[in-house]
């Protein structure tokens, strides 16, 4: 019954990368739309067309919600900046930043680690950095995927404040999918709530 | 034939609910059993007896009926007596014990015995409750075979016939069906940059493509009821926000602009709202925002702390979500906020069935995740067949 599923889906991987930062070719959109409208007899919904993304943005924060004092984040770096870099997981392993439960705030105890990472990046301008955000197993999966990203972006913002160009830094959240300690106790959770640093060097001969 | 069914149901209900005889005598409402079950926590299972079936067919019927609000009793205590045989093909009869009349009698052929049994179960549910059953629907879910290796699987709703649809040897997560199509969206860290990207995967055409591969987080895709839009979580602006785009990823628009970490967007069935989890004043909350943009409105969940993973029922009436107070619980509340959430069962990440009666969710057993099906209105729960590893993030085909 499910034999349509058996083909290895990996074969499409390469092509996809070229499209990563581009809006999809219209033809694919047309194909999807055709599939939507052609294959079922749903009564069409009357969906209000979305405003063009260039339109004037609405008030981003509802008046009733206390977001106004928070500065906006720093836009992510162009992902193409990080091609042809070799990963060094060991160089900055001593500076893994840990977090409180359910929080992306950087604690005072972690500040010296950020200084050390900033120094390493300053001393060699050819290097770049990946920050990997992780969570403990408490909290649901997609919630943790977002929280891990917020943790990574919080450290990226802190490094920017220390003078590091944020375009040298990318973030990846693994949510709770990559615990460093598989245990189910407070000690394991504390270790798993972390940002790991991966130092990136230009690949030689490229 | 149909009139006989209706008549029999009418008679049985009249016997059961004599106090409401006057109410039930009014035209069509007398068979609207749906009305009876849509009161959270107020419904008892429908007692049935099962005889003549063996092995896999008996197992399938028991599973399918149990998770759709039936209980099994002796024939002389049953409201409906289900009998039949599975020698060769499945054939079955449902007798209303009070009316002393067969209300369903059918022979099945084709496919295999398992599928025939599912078809009989759906016929029983439709005949007895007037609602379309879920026995022939599918689910998609995430399977972690080892740390950092997760693939997306699709199976029958009871976990049988599971097949991997990704072979990425990376983390894959958060599957979401396109309504009415054999196609899903999901997140995979497959590409060489290791970034979490959102894929659209057409299972019939056996092809997929990235529809959101922006720098940072791309995850938690959710498809609008008409299939033309996708809501998702992207962090390109500097924090995880709710974005919406056309089904192919074009016409991207940022909906939320908070510095917080939004997660798990889902659509109202009229396509007008997107509900999601966020944080306000240091507290995790559920909120909604117009799909065309606008102000965020908080959705209060009194008594249910740390709500995440909302899922709006296809009939529009309910929002299921996960609350966390130490452990996780699946909760359901009226989408219009007219009543406080009801905690149904320990578990997380609920996904509604197409008929808005049943949920599939993730349950922790020891250190592992398994998937369970929950009949919301009787609280009857059964684990589905497992794929070895941790099975989580279920999405019910709509």
Image: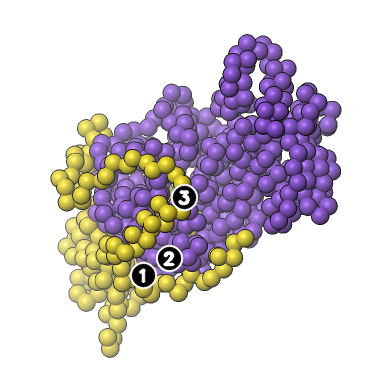
> Which residue does the image show at 62% across and 21% down from the upper left?
B30
CB atoms of marks 1 and 2 within 8 Å:
yes
> Which residue does the image show at 63% across and 11% down from the upper left?
B22
Locate the N terminus of chain A and report the quarter of the image it occupies.
bottom right
Instruction: For marks 1 and 2, give the CA distance.
Output: 9 Å
Which of labels 3 and 1 is toward the front? 3
Q: Residues within 10 Å of mark 1 (few under 14, many from 20)?
A: some
Q: Residue B16 at x, y = what percent? A: 71, 19
Using residue B371 as the reference point, say whether residue A169 is left or right of it. Answer: left
Q: Residue B371 at x, y = what percent? A: 60, 49
Q: How many marks?
A: 3
Instruction: State whether discs 1 and 2 lie on one chain.
Output: no
- Among the chains pictured, the one given purple colouring is B
Circle 3: element type = loop
Disc 3 sits on a residue from what chain? A
CB atoms of marks 2 and 3 within 8 Å:
no
Q: Which mark is residue B208?
A: 2
Instruction: State whether discs 2 and 3 lie on one chain.
Output: no
The numbered mark, 3 or 1, whose residue comes first in the sequence reads 1
Q: Which residue is mark 3?
A: A40
Kindly give the residue lying farthest to the left in the view shown: A56
Q: Which residue is mark 1?
A: A16
Instruction: For marks 2 and 3, give the CA distance.
Output: 21 Å
Instruction: For marks 3 and 1, give the CA distance.
Output: 28 Å
């Amino acid at each position: 019954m499910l034999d349509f599923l058996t083909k290895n889906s990996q074969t499409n991987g390469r092509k996809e990368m070229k499209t990563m930062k581009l809006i999809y070719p219209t033809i694919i959109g047309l194909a999807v739309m055709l599939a939507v409208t052609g294959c079922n007899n749903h009564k069409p919904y009357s969906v209000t067309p979305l405003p063009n993304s260039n339109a004037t943005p609405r008030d981003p924060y509802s008046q009733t919600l206390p977001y106004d004092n928070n500065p906006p984040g720093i836009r992510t770096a162009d992902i193409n900046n990080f091609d042809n870099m070799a990963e060094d997981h060991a160089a900055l392993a001593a500076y893994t930043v840990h977090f409180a439960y359910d929080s992306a705030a950087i604690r005072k105890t972690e500040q010296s680690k950020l200084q050390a990472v900033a120094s390493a990046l300053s001393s060699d301008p050819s290097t770049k950095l990946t920050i990997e955000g992780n969570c403990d197993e408490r909290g649901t999966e997609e919630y943790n995927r977002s929280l891990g990203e917020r943790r990574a972006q919080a450290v990226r913002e802190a490094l920017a404040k220390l003078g590091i160009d944020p375009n040298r830094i990318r973030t990846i959240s693994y949510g709770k999918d990559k615990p460093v300690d598989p245990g189910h106790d407070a000690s394991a959770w504390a270790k798993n709530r972390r940002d790991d640093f991966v130092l990136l060097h230009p690949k030689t001969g490229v | 034939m149909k009139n006989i069914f209706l008549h029999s149901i009418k008679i049985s209900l009249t016997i059961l609910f004599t106090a409401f005889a006057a109410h039930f005598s009014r035209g069509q409402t007398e068979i609207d059993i749906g009305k009876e079950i849509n009161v959270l926590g107020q419904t008892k299972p429908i007692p049935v007896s099962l005889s003549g079936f063996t092995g896999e067919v008996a197992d399938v019927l028991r599973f399918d009926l149990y998770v759709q609000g039936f209980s099994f009793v002796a024939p002389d205590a049953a409201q409906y007596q289900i009998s039949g045989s599975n020698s060769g093909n499945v054939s079955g009869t449902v007798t209303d014990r009070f009316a002393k009349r067969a209300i369903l009698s059918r022979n099945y052929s084709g496919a295999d015995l398992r599928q025939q049994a599912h078809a009989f179960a759906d016929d029983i549910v439709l005949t007895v409750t007037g609602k379309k059953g879920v026995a022939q629907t599918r689910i998609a879910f995430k399977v972690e075979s080892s740390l950092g290796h997760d693939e997306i699987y699709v199976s029958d709703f009871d976990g049988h016939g599971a097949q991997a649809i990704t072979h990425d040897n990376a983390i894959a997560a958060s599957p979401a069906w396109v309504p009415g199509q054999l196609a899903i969206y999901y997140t995979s860290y497959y590409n060489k940059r290791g970034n979490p990207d959102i894929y659209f995967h057409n299972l019939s055409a056996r092809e997929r493509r990235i529809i959101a591969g922006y720098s940072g987080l791309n995850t938690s895709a959710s498809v609008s009821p008409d299939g033309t839009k996708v809501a998702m979580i992207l962090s390109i602006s500097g924090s995880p926000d709710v974005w919406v785009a056309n089904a192919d990823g074009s016409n991207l628009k940022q909906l939320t602009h908070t510095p917080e970490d939004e997660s798990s967007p889902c659509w109202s069935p009229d396509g007008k709202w997107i509900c999601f989890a966020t944080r306000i004043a240091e507290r995790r909350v559920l909120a909604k925002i117009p799909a065309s943009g606008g102000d965020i409105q908080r959705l209060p969940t009194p008594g249910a702390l740390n709500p995440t993973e909302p899922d709006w029922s296809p009939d529009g009436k309910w929002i299921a979500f996960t609350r966390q107070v130490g452990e996780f619980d699946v909760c359901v509340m009226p989408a219009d906020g007219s009543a406080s959430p009801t905690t149904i069962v320990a578990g997380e990440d609920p996904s509604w069935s197409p008929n808005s009666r049943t949920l599939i969710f993730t349950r922790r057993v020891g250190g592992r995740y398994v998937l369970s099906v929950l009949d919301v209105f009787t609280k009857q729960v059964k684990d589905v067949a497992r794929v070895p590893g941790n099975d989580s993030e279920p999405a019910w085909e709509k």
